[in-house]
Image (tube, helix red, strand yellow):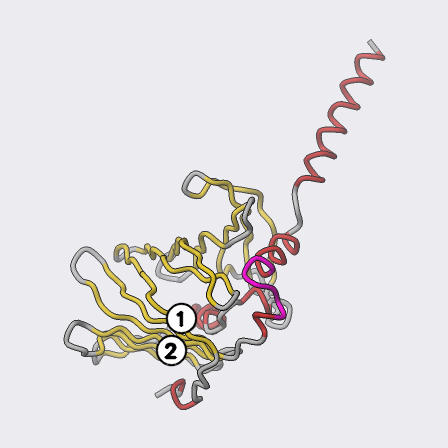
Amino acid sequence: MKKLLLVLTLSIVYSLTASAQQSPSADEVINKYIKVLGGKEALEKIKDISAQSTISNNSASNKQIWKYKIPDKRLVVINDGTGKIIYWQVIDGKQVTAKFGDSPMPTKPADLQLELLNGQWIPELNLKKNNVKYSLEGTEAIKGKQAYKIAYTLANGTALWTSYYDTQVGLLVRTVYAYQDGPLTMDISDYRAVNGIQLPYHSIDTNSTGQYVTQVSKYEFNTGLSDEEFVVK
């Protein structure tokens, strides 16, 4: 009996140890993601990035451009078929402003920090600088493939977003943003190399208002974007 208990105990210990060895830390998952994108050094050489795309739902397909100026500025503009601006948002690193048509869309105070962090192209590069906390919460199946789940919060524990990274490839495949009006889920796919950097060409955003499909047609790096494009009005 003692021998049997010893065998069972050793078996359990071995199983737990093997499991711990197979599970990476949150930092290892994030570092692999950054490496697979192209590496920290290459990513930090990018001072601005722009994309042209279409964004579609069941009723319409519109043109969208977005621009990031590193470290913390972002512009998003959506035009209808006539060229009229139907949505506009700018983040200048400290403030956020947006309009739907001619109507202002104020940012909820509880969402401000989340939006400001969204003004950063790859938040994973500056987590410690921005005092963002994160923890690995196991794995989940995303579209039939296992992904590491990492939860991101403010220092006070307020939820920001949860990201899922493919366990095999390492790329980001889903992010769920914790907005006050309800979650926004972004599924990301179709990564392609652009000047040595892996960038997604397809995404699906899902929230309480519906589902929106974005298809990127073109990326550009380091075009010398002016700060004047990111002025909060």
Residue 141 location (% of width, % of height): 47, 40
Label of residue 75 in the image: 2
User: Which residue sits at x=67%, y=39%?
Assistant: 22
State the residue at coordinates (43%, 89%): 226
Relative side of 65 to 178, left or right = left
Q: Earlier in the sequence, mark 1 or mark 2?
A: 2
Label 1: which residue? Answer: 219
Segment colored magenta? 35-41
Q: Position of residue 70 (x, y in %)?
A: 51, 78
In the figure, is residue 169 to the left or right of 178? right
Q: Identify the image quadrant of the N terminus.
A: top right
Q: Name above or below for residue 122 compared with residue 168.
A: below
Using the numbered discs, state the Cα–Cα distance from disc 1 to disc 2 in whole angstroms: 14 Å
Q: Amino acid at mark 1?
A: Tyr
Question: Mark 2: which secondary structure?
Answer: strand
Image coordinates of residue 178 in percent, x first then y, are 44, 59
Quarter of the view holding residue 213? bottom left
- Find out whether residue 62 is within the magenta segment: no
> In this rendering, is residue 59 above or below 121?
above
Whether 40 is among the magenta residues is yes
